Image: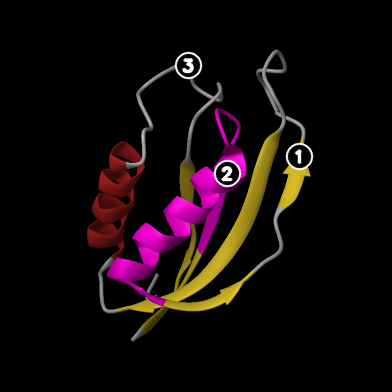
Amino acid sequence: MIEILLGLGSNLGDCAEQLRRAVAALSAELRLGAVSSVYQSAPMYVLDQPPFLNMALSMRATLAPLELLGLVKRLEAELGRVPGQRFGPRAVDIDLLFHGDS
């Protein structure tokens, strides 16, 4: 199993619920480890948007980096993320922060 770190964010709709749904969806696919607290942060680059709720997860999996990226992109879409302005508002954002094999 490979150690993976993910960053989650949301600033549209019920952000806390969006994060809960994202954790549940990821946990159905990967082995959940540690879960951070949820914190609020100001947007960057595009400032005319709501603040974000953010959190981080450690997980374990056997997926290669590109397989993990494909899974994350699929889950983002299933959770309501639609293409939009770069750095703009989004229902859910899942960032790959660390993959133990790379």
Q: How is the image coloured?
A: secondary structure
Three-letter residue code for mark 3: Gln
Residue at the image point whose x is 44% and y is 52% from the top: 21
Residue at the image point whose x is 75% and y is 51% from the top: 39
Q: Please give the label number shown on residue 85.
A: 3
Of the residues under marks 2 and 1, which one precedes in the sequence?
2
Mark 3 and mark 1: span between their CA atoms?
A: 19 Å
Three-letter residue code for mark 2: Gly
Task: Place residue 30 in its image quadrant.
Answer: bottom left
Q: Nearer the viewer, residue 67 or 13?
A: 13
Q: Does 44 appear in magenta?
A: no
Marks 2 & 1, CB-CB < 8 Å contact: yes
Image position, residue 54 (x, y; %): 65, 48
Task: Place residue 29 in its image quadrant.
Answer: bottom left
Mark 2 and mark 1: span between their CA atoms?
A: 9 Å
Front of the two marks 3 and 1:
1
Image position, residue 60 (x, y; %): 40, 79
Looking at the picture, does residue 77 appear above or below residue 48?
below
Q: Residues within 10 Å of mark 1 (few under 14, many from 20)?
A: few
Three-letter residue code for mark 1: Ser
Image position, residue 71 (x, y; %): 26, 55
Residue identified by numbered label 1: 41
Task: Place residue 2 in its image quadrant.
Answer: bottom left
Front of the two marks 3 and 2:
2
Looking at the picture, does residue 44 appear above or below residue 61?
above
Q: Quadrant of the C terminus?
A: bottom left
Q: Which residues are magenta?
A: 6-31
Q: Secondary structure at mark 3?
A: loop
Marks 3 & 2, CB-CB < 8 Å contact: no
Q: Secondary structure at mark 2?
A: strand
Q: Please give the label number shown on residue 9.
A: 2
Q: Secondary structure at mark 1?
A: strand
